[in-house]
Image: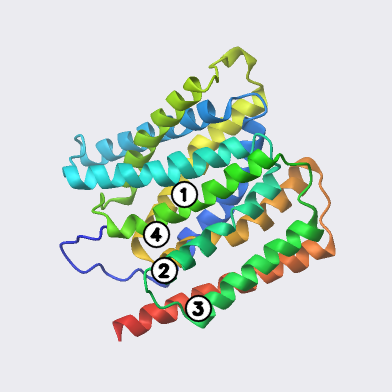
Amino acid sequence: MSAVTDRTPTPPSGRAVAGNLAVVYVVFGSTYLAIRIMVETIPPLVGAGLRFAVAGALLYGMCAVRSRSLPRMETDRLVGTGFIGLLVIGAGLGLLTLGEHSVPSGLAALLAAAVPVWVVLLRAAHGERVGWSTWGGVVCGLFGVALLSLVGGAGGTAAVSGILFLLAAALSEAVGSYYAPRFSLVEDPILASAVQMLVAGPVLFVVGLAVGEHLDVDRWSQRSLLSLLYLIGPGSILAYVSFVWLVSRTRTSIATTYTYVNPAVALFLGWLVLDESITVWVVVGALIVVVGVVAVLVGERGAEDDGRA
């Protein structure tokens, strides 16, 4: 997953890509609801800091057990991985958690759809060729989430500050995802995830305390605590490892297509958990989102095949 490699990486199999995409689609989609429930009684930055610090420590422990020693990393790879962690986890997911304190989970997932747009614009700004299928997929995907937003019923009211936090989160995540392959990074996806979380988690926790948040555990509700535990386990350890794998082994445009699927997943979970209604327009919007994802996947896979020809 580094811009500086010792050998040409083996192209990932379609089955591996599809499997990791499925994990990212479903689990990341469920984290919006979990975050919304967590921040009901747990301060957002403190909660996010605990989430990633604990998940990072567990992942690092898994790596140590697997190798039967403390993992060793080159300094440049450690620094590069930590920096990307600050962008994607610290700024990206930290601002997302902060935004969901005043924005419904469904709307938060919709606003996260800005990530692939920023990525494509970054690619174009750097002179990279972007195929028409990719552009079409981006437009189609955004049209689908716009339809979900306008007539699908994301539900609830949102503060302007929360929306701004979420837009800034999408930009930070896009920048981190786009530049990740250009840094010398830790190659093992699990160890890379652990490093990024261990760097970003404590920073989020300290920033939260600095801005006035408190660690009042006795005020946490049971369901907020359970949501935090879910975010530590599947929401961080499982999903983020899959995401790092995708970023390191596929085009960024493919890795970030999960932001198209997340709104549909978030809205479905809102119906399942919070008894929100799903109209015919929600179904139509979800289908348009799927078409957009397929268009991006086909376009980017074709571009990879052309580059290897």
Identify the coloring.
rainbow
Pointer 4 local density, CA inside 10 Å: few below 14, some 14–19, many at least 20? many
Check disc 4 and report the residue beneath it.
Answer: 178
Front tag of 4 and 3: 4
Q: Looking at the picture, which amino acid does disc 2 mark?
A: Ala
Mark 2 vs mark 1, CA separation in Å: 16 Å
Q: From the image, which quarter does the C terminus lie in?
A: bottom left
Image spot of residue 179 (x, y percent): 35, 57
Secondary structure category for the residue under label 1: helix
Image spot of residue 148 (x, y percent): 74, 60
Secondary structure category for the residue under label 3: helix
Pointer 2 local density, CA inside 10 Å: few below 14, some 14–19, many at least 20? few
Mark 4 vs mark 1, CA separation in Å: 10 Å
Q: Looking at the picture, which amino acid does disc 3 mark?
A: Val
Front tag of 3 and 2: 2
Image spot of residue 12 (x, y percent): 35, 68
Secondary structure category for the residue under label 4: helix
Mark 4 vs mark 2, CA separation in Å: 12 Å
Mark 3 / mark 2, whichever is N-terminal: 2
Mark 3 vs mark 2, CA separation in Å: 22 Å
Give the number of the disc on residue 125: 2
Vertical comparison of 104 with 152: above or below: above
Mark 1 / mark 3, whichever is N-terminal: 1
Residue at point 60%, 25% (across, down): 42
